[in-house]
Image (cartoon, rainbow, N blue to C red):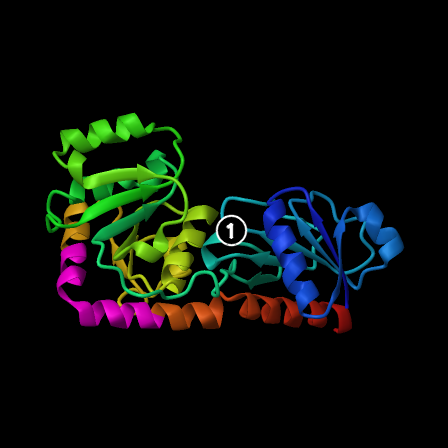
Amino acid sequence: MRILVVARSVVQEAELLCRILTKAGHEVLPGTAANGADFHPDVTVCYGVESGSVFCSPVVSVISYGTGSQLNQADVHVFSGRSVIPPGFQGRAVVIPHPVDTGKFAPAAKSDKKIILAPGELNPEQGHKTLIRAMHLVKPDYNAVFVGQEGYYSVKQMVSYAAEMGVQNRVQFLEGEFVHSTTLGVVTGYGTQLETDKVIEIMASGVPVLVAAADWSRDIVIDGVTGLFHSPGNWKQLAGQINHLIDNSGLCDMLSGNARDYCLKHFSYESFGERWTELLEQLSFG
């Protein structure tokens, strides 16, 4: 199948789709509508493109969490989660979650480090202060590591807040990958593509994850099966869940195993490629 992928936003997502579809045996051209005139695609996939009138092939418009724009002329709209579909949406909607590299993010040997990982930029919508407040109720031999760049808050401001809560010696702020050496993952934010990616990476790595209950989190986590939900901002509930998991290795193992299996089935590159191939073949040959 000949596929043109046009991207004016979320270029990295588009590049990933190109790589996976190429690996699946399709002829893929990343570029612009002008490229498609010579390429004669069977299907065109658009990221953040405003007009589909220049395309002669069936068109797929892609919308992720907080990214992309709706293409009115598209034959199909692909959303990264059900929570992304606008209320009252009238077009044809298909949900294909953003994938994770389940080879890179895979269970590793258990670490003796007692670390709670909280990924995400230091912004109010990430809800990091919920975990900081919870730490004074969490078992004292566990520390929280916040992994992400400075944003609305600086590291200095967050350290100051931790000092106000009396837990400044139990939190760290770092950048880079950290998931393999953690005991638990905590994501307390309101839902962005970055947050969904991080939750899936934690799940694929076999690390139990505690997530703020929201529409976006219900797209990727099954409460009590692949992770645990807490009410957004409820630091006492979060602390109780953390301590419960620390004391119950059997529950941790169950959540970890279920989450890993769920990622392989729904969020792997292979699953992603199969779903896209099925959709594009329907458009091309249907």
Residue 19 in which image quadrant:
bottom right
For the residue pair 184 and 279, the one nearer the viewer reads as 184
Q: Amino acid at mark 1?
A: Pro
For the residue pair 30 and 103, the one nearer the viewer reads as 103
Residue drawn 38% across the image and 69% down it: 260
Residue drawn 52% across the image and 56% down it: 80
Q: Position of residue 232 (x, y in %)?
A: 27, 47
Q: Taking 135 as reference, is 280 left or right?
A: right
Q: Taking 257 as reference, is 72 left or right?
A: right
Q: Is 5 one of the magenta-colored residues?
A: no
Which stretch did the figure color magenta? 241-258
**Which residue carries the number 1 mark?**
86
User: Does residue 280 lie above or below 243 as drawn?
Assistant: below
For the residue pair 183 and 136, the one nearer the viewer reads as 183
Q: Is 242 one of the magenta-colored residues?
A: yes
Q: Taking 239 as reference, is 177 left or right?
A: right
Residue 283 in which image quadrant:
bottom right
Q: Position of residue 84 (x, y in %)?
A: 49, 52
- Element type at mark 1: loop
Q: Quadrant of the C terminus?
A: bottom right
